[in-house]
Amino acid sequence: MNASSCKVCMLGDFGVGKTSLVARYVRSTFSDKYLTTVGVKVDSKEVALPGCEPVKLVLWDIAGRSALDAPSTSYLRGASALLLVADGTREASLSSALNLLMQSRSTLPDAVAVLAVNKLDIVERWEVAATTLAEMRRSLPVFETSALSGAGVEDAFAEIARRLVG
Amino acid sequence: MTSPGIGDLAGRPVAPRMADPAEAPSREASEAPGGFERLRELLLGGERRELADARARIAELERAQRDLPARLPDAAVEALRNEQGNPRVAAALSEPVAQALGAAVQKHRQSLVDALFPILGPMIRKSIAEALRSLVANLNGAIESSFTARGLKWRFEAWRGGVPYAEVVLKHRLAYGIDHVFLIERASGLVLHHASAPGLPPLDADAIAGMLTALGDFVDDSVGGDVGGALESAQVGADLVWVEHGPRANLACFVHGVPPAQLRTLMEQRLEEIHAHLLALPPDAPLQSLGEDALVRGLLAPAALLRDTEEATAPSSARKPSRVPLLVIGALALALLGGLAWSRWRWDARIDALRARLAAHPGFVLTGIEARAWRALTVHGLLDPDAEPLDAVLAGADLGAVVPTLDASGYVSTDDAVIARRAARLLAPPGSVTLAVQGRVLRLSGTAPQAWIDAAQARAPWVAGVARVESSLSAAAAGAGDDAAVAQRQARLELERVLAELQARHVAFVQGVDPADGADAVVDDLAASLRRVTALAPAAKVEVGIRAYGSNDESGGSETNARVRAQRAQWLEHALAARGITGVSVADSAQPADAPNRRGAELRATVREAGP
């Protein structure tokens, strides 16, 4: 195998744009219908980092929910990183993302965590205050992303890859 | 030897010692002048110190022994952790642990059963399910091919090679291929190793392995329950995924076609070998490098899996079953078939013999034989009433317990023997007359009363089947007795004829008792016949009773018809009485035995011997 593989789970409330972020980032092998049937869809993306071995991110796009249930917890097993996704236009989704992070810590105490606040393309309708984001940046990397325009998406995944390699 | 002075024997100075209370009695017992005590110290001081050291070591060992139960678990864990691939502790513990388990099985069986029950149940169920699945797969294959030309060919191949039929079926059903092999980390679903068959397009192995793991988790969470089931196979059309689960890694094979059960077994073996290889790694060591391992690559190559599966399904000469049972069964079957054939042959031979005897029997025409071997037999044919009965022929057929039945219709035979019997019956020749038939020519010879000769010559040409009569009879001087007998017989024959004609006539009616045209003429004839009967009866020495019957057709009710029958019988009796015929009885509504279906009236006669 040319690149080491790492399992990355995407967590976030319903409708925050997790699947859109993945779709922006990779060309999916499987249909989105798995999200509504099995509750998860898996894709992979190889990330090349300057001066490092490439890293293959195996992205587990877990169906949106505000709290972890048993199936979602089982999907988290063996993950090396978490991409928490929140919707900037819904402040409650940020709370859900943080809540999911807290819950997943019991299963993944050492996993890398990155927060993506999505829907940057309609930033004028954001409920999440900049001060809140600034406060959160003290605890974990935060990226403002737009699945529509692609802004910040590559950076968020690259950050995950960097932290996994580092 | 010089004195060492104050010190031990090695010259080291001896330190002053505190008095040992345990030694006090000894010291008191050996109270002696001070020089002696000093001398003893000089001589035995070394040994006494060694003794004290030994006592101290014993005390230390006893203390360690007392503390051992408390320290043993931690010490064992520590020792196992520090073994570094040299399993001395495990080897040392294996024997006592095995003995302890043996003792526990004997003394605490129920406790062991209770402890193992949660494990044994799922294991047994899984084993049974796997065995049944394999059995069903094999049965399906066998049944599909059992009754075809290909199946028969495989059976011959199995018989010739001395291998079970199932093995041959499996060998020929190996029309399958392994497309992809995945070794997947159980916890994360990440690919540890992936290999594809040549010529297949590339695929996202990480995504597929992840989805397969997710599906397994989904199935487990959905329907696994407390048992901890897992996705072991999935099939869509001719494509199949088999998954074998291990403690740290799962092995998945994507297969097209119908693989034999041996592939599943081989997957289990390969996964066990990989896990045995993993034992060399620390439990928390990353498994990512496993895919680079040459051993793993060799074990999981699709071509190697195919090759080893085919070897496992190939017939093995070492496993040739004995042919003796098959030969015994074959011999028994042949004996049974031979017995059945012999029995059938005997039956057919006897039926053929019976058929020949029946065909040669005069006065009988065989139309068919309906037979079930050694169970039933019915002979169909035409039989002349004057022919010899067939009872002797049928009884001589020797058909065992089968009693033949005869279904015969009457006919008139022209066989010479039957014609002779018929002529004898009708002509009633006296003992001095010889009657013979040859070529349908009736030859009469001998002597007889003239009256009989006259009657015979008159009647003989009328015997059915007789073409010509040749007579060389000569009249014999007849006695009075002979003449009377001849006269009586001739009278009876005449009476028989007249009565037959009488009973063949009937008076027809249009409706009720309205006679049809010609009824009077019929009544006149009947009256004439009755007069002739009256004249012949005394000569024949018989008494003749005449009874008038009425008859009707099927129309009308039963009561009406009964009344009409009685009226018609009375009409006929009155008509005869009007012509001078008396003594005719009326049957009222009774019908004659032949119950003619017509509107009429008729006479029936009863003949009995006259009294002396």
Image (tube, coloured by chain):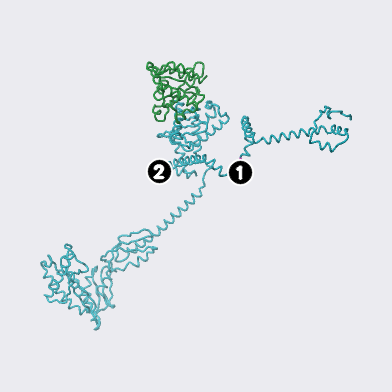
Side of B196 relative to B425 (left or right): right
Q: Amino acid at mark 2?
A: Thr
Q: Is residue B594 left or right of residue B178?
A: left
Taking depth in this image into account, of B81 and B47 the one nearest to the observer is: B47
- Chain letter, disc 1 residue: B
Q: Main secondary structure of the magenta part?
A: helix
Q: Secondary structure at mark 2?
A: loop
- From the image, state the color of chain A: green
Label 1: few (<14), some or many (≥20) within 10 Å? few
**Which residue is the extreme one toward the bottom?**
B480
Separation (CA) of disc 2 from disc 1: 58 Å
Lower position in the chain sequence, tag 2 or tag 1: 1
Residue B88 picture quarter: top right
Q: Camera-side residue: A54 or B537?
A: A54
Image colour assigned to chain B: cyan
Which residue is at the front of the view, A80 or B383?
A80
Q: Nearer the viewer, residue B453 or B576?
A: B576
| Pointer 2 residue | B148
- The C terminus of chain B sits in image quarter: bottom left
Residue at horizontal 18%, vertical 69%? B589
* Residue position marked by numbered label 1 in the rendering: B103
Residue B99 among magenta residues? yes
